[in-house]
Image: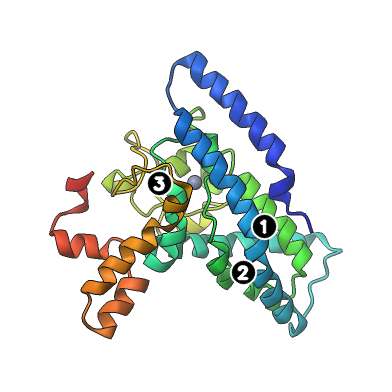
Amino acid sequence: MIRPTVLAVPIFALLIAVEYWWDLRQKTNEYERKDTWTNIALGFGSLFFGAIFGIIQFTGYELLYSIAPYKMPMDTVWAWVLLVFVDDFAYYWFHRMSHESRFLWNFHVVHHSSEHYNLSVAVRQSWFGGLAHWIFYIPMGLLGFPYWTFVIVHGFNLIYQYWIHTEFIGKLGWFEWIFNTPSQHRVHHAVNPQYLDRNYAGIFCIWDRMFRTFTPESEKPRYGIIKPINSYNWLWINTHGWAEMWDALKEKKTVYGKLRCIFGAPNMDFEENSNLKIESKI
Ligand SMILES: [Zn+2]
Ligand SMILES: [Zn+2]
């Protein structure tokens, strides 16, 4: 079935054009031409590879759904509302682990490696993330939500996250208490020390508040990753994390050390080897 994110491409393109025009008019320099085209290319690539790797997710999901003891009645409103929350909860953990474990970060780093912040960064997505993404979502099959309902709700979750990639919307009052917003997601993309590994929300920021990963925007965010990638090469942007991990792995002498290097925190080696605090590198 066609994913909602594919159907949303014309709207995404139109909104990028509008924001780009506004950026030129305001002379705010949020857009950099080469960065923007790279983001768009990475977006199309992720749709293409996502369709291929989606087969893994579909197969695993259907398998678990077939053995689910209870099938959700999708002709009721409550089942759809529950699905929105369950999917968003799964997203929170998928996203959080994508920052806290190097294995998953090697995919997700693609989204964070732009040093700009605008709507085009929303579509800057990993090409190969589909190889790991399914781990967090196929349990929803076991809960009895049919695959097609998951595809719709998850698609809208991702579409929701599009509009929060902008500098042009400030804080939104009461909305900030429940929903993820541009202000909160700017914090998520920033490398200011107090902003690192914060605000993992998809639609609802309630998970960040519950699990104490919420930080409101205060000082101006600086965007990117701790070790800038300095490349516009699509393939390198998608694979540099693995190359760096491979180099770090060769230094590890024990099995425990190697496992920790793969599944531990992404910046562990950097912190251990350089004896530098993250702050001093930014
Ligand atoms: Zn992230
Ligand atoms: Zn983002």
Tag shown at residue 113: 3
Neighbours of disc 2 within 10 Å: few (<14), some (14-19), many (20+): many
Does the beta carbon at disc 1 come under 8 Å from ligand 2?
Answer: no
| Residue 119 placement (x, y as % from top left) | 54, 35
Quadrant where the C terminus sits is top left
Chain-order first, disc 3 or disc 2: 3
Does the beta carbon at disc 2 come under 8 Å from ligand 1?
Answer: no
Q: Residue at x 35, y 72 (%)?
A: 262
Does residue 89 appear left or right of residue 262 in this picture?
right
Check contact, mark 3 vs mark 1: CB within 8 A.
no
| Residue 218 placement (x, y as % from top left) | 34, 37
- How far apart are the two marked residues, 3 and 1, measured between alpha carbons? 24 Å
Q: Is residue 48 above or below residue 102?
A: above
Nearer the observer: mark 3 or 2; the answer is: 3
Q: Is residue 158 visible?
A: yes
Q: Is residue 199 above or below residue 151?
A: above
> Which residue is label 1 attached to?
154
Q: Amino acid at mark 1?
A: His
Q: Is label 1 in a helix, a strand or a loop? A: helix
Check contact, mark 1 vs mark 2: CB within 8 A.
yes
Q: Is residue 142 above or below residue 124?
A: below
> Which residue is label 2 attached to?
137
Check contact, mark 3 vs mark 2: CB within 8 A.
no
| Residue 46 placement (x, y as % from top left) | 59, 52
Neighbours of disc 1 within 10 Å: few (<14), some (14-19), many (20+): many
In the current view of this chain or complex, which residue is farthest to the left?
Answer: 275
In the current view of this chain or complex, which residue is farthest to the right?
Answer: 75
